[in-house]
Image: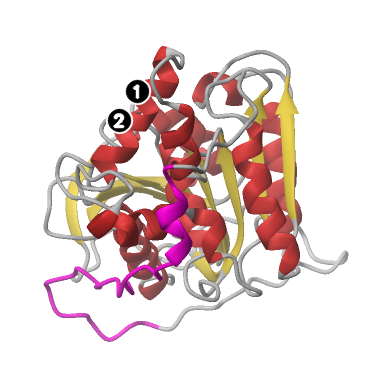
Amino acid sequence: MRRTVSVGALALAAVLLAPAAVSPAAAVTAPTPTPTPSPTATPAPSPSQSRPPAQDPLALTVKRTFSYGTKASQRMDAWWQPDGVRRPAVFVLHGGWWSGGDKKYMTSVTKSYAEMGYTVFNLNYRLSSEAAWPAQRSDTLAAIALARKHADYFSFDANRYVIVGFSAGGHIATSVGTYKDGVPGLRGVVGISPVVSPLTAYSDGDEGAAFDQRKLRQSAIALAGGCLPTGRCARVWSSMEVPWHASAHDAPVLSVHSEDEFVPAYQSELLKQQLAQVGVPMEIRVMPGYYHSSPLYREPGVAEGVQEWIAGKLGQPAPTMPDRSGAAASDLPSLRKVAVRKPAAH
C-alpha cells in the first residue's frame, strides 16, 4: 500500500480557490400547508404511572419514498413512526464511485437504524454522469432541508441528526459536514471508507497503481466534469477537497478504513489534521484486512461501533410509544410521494 501523497502535479491547487456557494433549493413544487402543531417531546411517565407495553419500532414504522427535486435521481426513502414523538435522525448515503450505486443497496443499513428507533432517510443523488460536482453535495443539502422543513410530519428532531456515508457517499457526507461554517442540526458525520481527498486519490491512481486506485482516479476526474486538477478546473477540485474546508463549527467525524483497502486511512488523517486545527474532534478507526465500504461495515464490531458512536452524538432515540396522535400515514400535500412500498431486505 502506497503511503506517500504526491503533490507535484497538484501544486496548482495551492491557489486554494474557494468552492462556489451552494444554496440548496427546497425542491418542492406544491404549496406548503399550514403546519399542525404537535408536541416536540413526550415526557417519560412517572414511576406511579402505568407504562405502555414495549412495541417493535418496525411494526409502527411508515416507509415511503419522496422526491426532494425534479430529477428521477433526487429521491429519498423515509422511515418514521408517525406518533408525534420527535426522534433524532440518520441520513444514509450510498457509495458507487460517484457514478453508480443506489439507495436500495442501503436498505439493510436503513432498517437497522429504524429498528433502533431513529427516523431514517436513505438518499439517492445525481450521479457524476448526470451532473458534475457540487451537484451531489447540493442534493444532500436539499434533502436535509426538506426533511427539516417537515420535521413534524416525519417525527424528526431537526436539531439532532447524523449522516452516514459509504465510500463516495462518505466523501459527500464529509463535504456536507465541512460545508460553510457548520450545517444546522448536524451532530456528526460517519464515513465508511470515505474518499475525503480526491486530490490524493488522483495522485495515488497514476500509472502503475492498482486497478481500484486507477479507477478511483478516473472516477474523481468524472466527478469534476471530466477535468484534470489543472487550469480552469482548479476551482472544482478545490471544492471537492474536504480537508481544505474545515471550520470551527463543523460536525465531529468518525472515519473507518481497512488497513489495506484502496482508500487508505491517510486520506482521513488529512481531514483530522485540519479539523484539529479548528478544534473539531475526529476519530479514525482502522480495521485489519482489505474490505471496503459496505463489506467493511459488515465486519464484526464495525456496525456496532458506529451505532455506539452515533448514540453518543444524538442520545438514544425517544422510547417507542403507542400512536396517540390519531394521525394517519397520509401524504403531506407539499411532499411529492413517489411510491408506497415495503422495501425489500438486502
The magenta-colored residue range is: 9-36
Q: Nearer the viewer, residue 106 or 190?
A: 190
300 is within the stretch colored magenta: no
Answer above or below: position of 161 versus 248.
above
Using a 10 Å C-alpha cutoff, classify the residue at mark 1 as few (fewer than 14 neighbours), some (14 to 19) or many (20 or more): some
The relative height of residue 13 versus residue 210 in the rendered view (above or below) is below
Residue 113 in sight here: yes
- Give the image location of residue 186, x and y in percent: 56, 66
Amino acid type assigned to the residue bearing label 2 in the image = Gln
Residue 121 at x, y percent in the picture? 41, 50
- Decide if residue 170 is on the left or right side of residue 336: right
In the foreground, 158 or 342: 158
User: Considering the numbered disc 2 on the image, is that residue within a helix, a strand or a loop?
Assistant: helix
Say which amino acid is labelled 1. Lys
Residue lying farthest to the bottom in this orientation: 34
* Count of numbered marks: 2
Q: Which residue is at 39% across, 63% downward?
A: 144
Residue for badge 2: 218
**Residue 142 circle label:** none
Q: Position of residue 346 (x, y in %)?
A: 41, 20
Does the stretch in magenta take in 25?
A: yes
Q: Is residue 1 left or right of residue 281?
A: left
Q: Report the residue marked by disc 1.
A: 215
Can you say which quadrant of the picture contains the N terminus? top right
Main SS, magenta region, reads loop
Which of 215 and 229 lies nearest the eye of the viewer?
229
Q: Residue at x 50, y 33 (%)?
A: 109
Residue 231 placed where, x, y %?
27, 56
In the current view of this chain or complex, which residue is farthest to the right? 47
